Amino acid sequence: MNIFIVSDDTALPLDRQQLACRIRNAVAETDDVPAIGCELIGHDEFSTLSLADGDIVIVYGMCAQDDDCLHGIADRCEKLGVRLALATKLPVFRTDVPDAAYPTAVDMAVRDVARERRLHVLDLFAYAMSWYMREYESERAQLLEPVEGGRRLSGAAATMVTSFVARWVVRRYFSRGHITDRLYGASMYPEMWSEETNDEDMNHAHDIGMNAVRIGEFFWSKLEPEEGHYDMAYLEGLLDRYRARGLKVVLGVPTPTPPRWFTLAYPQSCVVDADGRVMRHGSRQHVCTNNPDYRRKAYQLTRRIGEVASRYPNVVAIQLDNEFKCHVDMCFCETCRRLWPQWLQSKYGDIETLNAAWGTGIWSERYDSFADVVMPEATPFAHNSSLDYAFRTFTADTLTQFASGLAQILVEATSIPLTHNTSTNFNLRNYDLFDQLDIVGFDTYPNSLTPWMFPMNLGLWRNLIPNDDVLLLETCSSHVGYTGNYMLPHPTGFLETEVFLGYASGLRSFLYWLYRGQKHGVEQPHGAVVTAAGTPDIGYDDVLASQRLLSRQSPFLEETEVVRSSVAMVYSDEARRAYNVESGGIYNFKTMVTDYYHALSSRGVDPELIPENADFTRYRCVLMPFVRCVDARLLAKCRQYVEQGGKLVLGPMTGDRTADMAWNTADGNGLGELGEWMGVSDVVQYLSADPRTEAVVSVGKAHDALGGLVTMFRAERPLDYMTVTSDVAAGRTAVARRDGAVYIGGIPAQADGSAFWDALVAHDIAPFDDDRAFVRAGGAVLKFRRDNERYADFHIANMGGAPASIDVAKPATDLDGMPVAPGTFELAPFACALLRFAK
């Protein structure tokens, strides 16, 4: 096996012989491996290079400026079964600005291509920046050399860089990155309680069957009570006590809560909102993650945490920060003001390209330089949607850079899997974020009124990166709440359906927030396993019942593997940003996706949720709603999928905007090249919400109406089982077909009882659902499938408060091994069932 570093940079501080040796030694500790060689070659040599299945290619340097070049390399590697990674460039550290450096256009191209092709990024830029920002100048000077524009790592840094690259390669390509146990536990906050209370909680958690805790994401002040004075003995003592009780630990890096001494010393680090208000100390996420002083201190602390964690085998994962962008999104501080034009230059190259993409001829918005481009601060009316969208993307990108810096420090310090607790609520680029980590982690707080939100999250996060392990890091045992919002508790039994479906879907952890209720702060109303007084909380009995159910379910989980649905719907972080810019006063992306998912699941189709960069060919039917920008490469992917026999359902609002949020007027039809392919023209959009002007749907003798923003057009091939008409858009329809592709220009405001949804699912979605050959359900009944060579298992739960019917197509056995005959049987409210079918 060979590792090829493709680079035209002859000064790259990397020792290839040492790299091969370090990788070989690390892998030999756990596996028998063949000889590993390492070669450093120029870009021009790649086309003639002899490659073999299993080789690793890492592309670094100037060829990354050419997207087509990178795609060509990716095509060749994919064809040959060669593993490919793209590397960002080691930076030139500037001495004239406190930020030291900013990613170049090359780095942005690397990330864009890697995101599209689902490739790993070896983030040497973030690695070097995190080293530079956490070290003192006396340490830096030994490994830096002067170059034009600043300083860069010299040959003296080869050992350090080589060691890091070796650890990264082992982690990405040889380490399984798995958590072998199924973790069941809760978040604990030992910093808030006495040692006696902590001991009581640790013992009680163990006694009720929990095997894991999550700690540490907020206790920065315990680890660094004064600047530069660290008390890591506090962390070591906690880990010792958890280990003594057999409790595994998901350890948080407490960067969301800088202590008061930090904000006193560095007041300029605080977040500034669009109205110029400065966030004050007293909550969390009050400091801008771009601020160089904050990054320096965060990186220094992270290094120490990694060093401690590496000595404790009961630390099974390290969680970066906590819910990035939970409380704050865009920041307008002086650091962001300085970085914004640099990001724009890296993205657009020259100012005329930006002016053209944004249409700055409108309202005299034209810019003469990137330094002139404003941030979307308070203005009399709305900002140009292109500006607004770009700034939100800038925010997500810079957050990823910060997180990547944390990750590279931990890659260097430990082999423990890395994760983060993300959510559908936040402005992130989740693929970029988790590509630098090992296991996807998420938080979700479902309620029994919209129970399908929970399986929707399960279906989303297990498909983000190529790792079936997923961690549920926060959910409630009964109810959420804080001092500003009281919430309803779960009905008795609802929690068991979450646990049952969760582990069936592939979860490796189910962790409650929180174990002991908060006595102080703002989240005293939040449900917990036990109250602040230590007595059982409302959900306590369900927590115990869920653990007993897991014990019965576990043997089936152990002998099977996750099988994904044959139907998938695309979930897009880029689309989420787009609807934050253009909501029309009616749209919330999370609600839109949830309602669309419910329209399917209530009709018996439980789809996967996949990102745009997923492999569509793994599914028989792909639905792509709300993805406003369909660029040339995504369109080519869609067309190829259909040509290969896939069923594709597009819309609503798919392809109607460019990557800069402009009307997609290419080819003169309002849907660009996508519209041309689908054979539509004369495109208009309007709000369908008034009976006098709504878009009316007819399916045989049944009628329905589209709601929200509808796209209507003239179609060469309208659907044959449905018509859509509108008085205000006369002569147009909202449904079109091309071979195996369907475009729908709108959906009804309500999915329940909808003739539109009944017809669409029956004709163009359900026939492609492989699960229907075994079992059919619907309503509030949700399911996940797991198989082995002999059996197909369906883990089924009625998450609703009324009995529900399930149609069984073949003979099966249940959780207790009892036979289940084909036919219809009733599942009680909040009941769980397992059906095992012989293959």
Image (tube, rainbow, N blue to C red):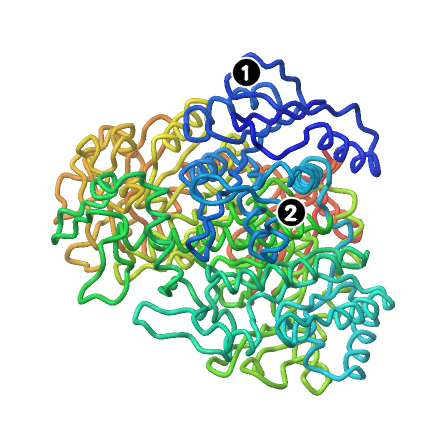
Disc 1 vs disc 2: which is toward the camera?
1
Query: Does residue 514 appear left or right of residue 569 in this picture?
Result: right
Give the labeled residue for mark 2: 438
x then y, percent, for residue 662: 23, 45
Q: Residue 576 versus residue 162: which sits nearer the camera?
A: 162
Q: Residue at x 54, y 67 (%)?
A: 448
Total labels: the figure holds: 2
Q: Quadrant of residue 527?
A: bottom right
What amino acid is found at the position of numbered circle 2 in the picture?
Answer: Asp
SS category of the residue bearing label 1: helix
Quarter of the N terminus within the rendering: top right
Question: Is 611 situated above or below 214?
Answer: above
x then y, percent, for residue 295: 53, 60
Question: Is 121 situated above or below 247?
Answer: above
Q: Quadrant of residue 682?
A: top left
Give the labeled residue for mark 1: 45
Question: Is 132 situated above or below 667?
Answer: below
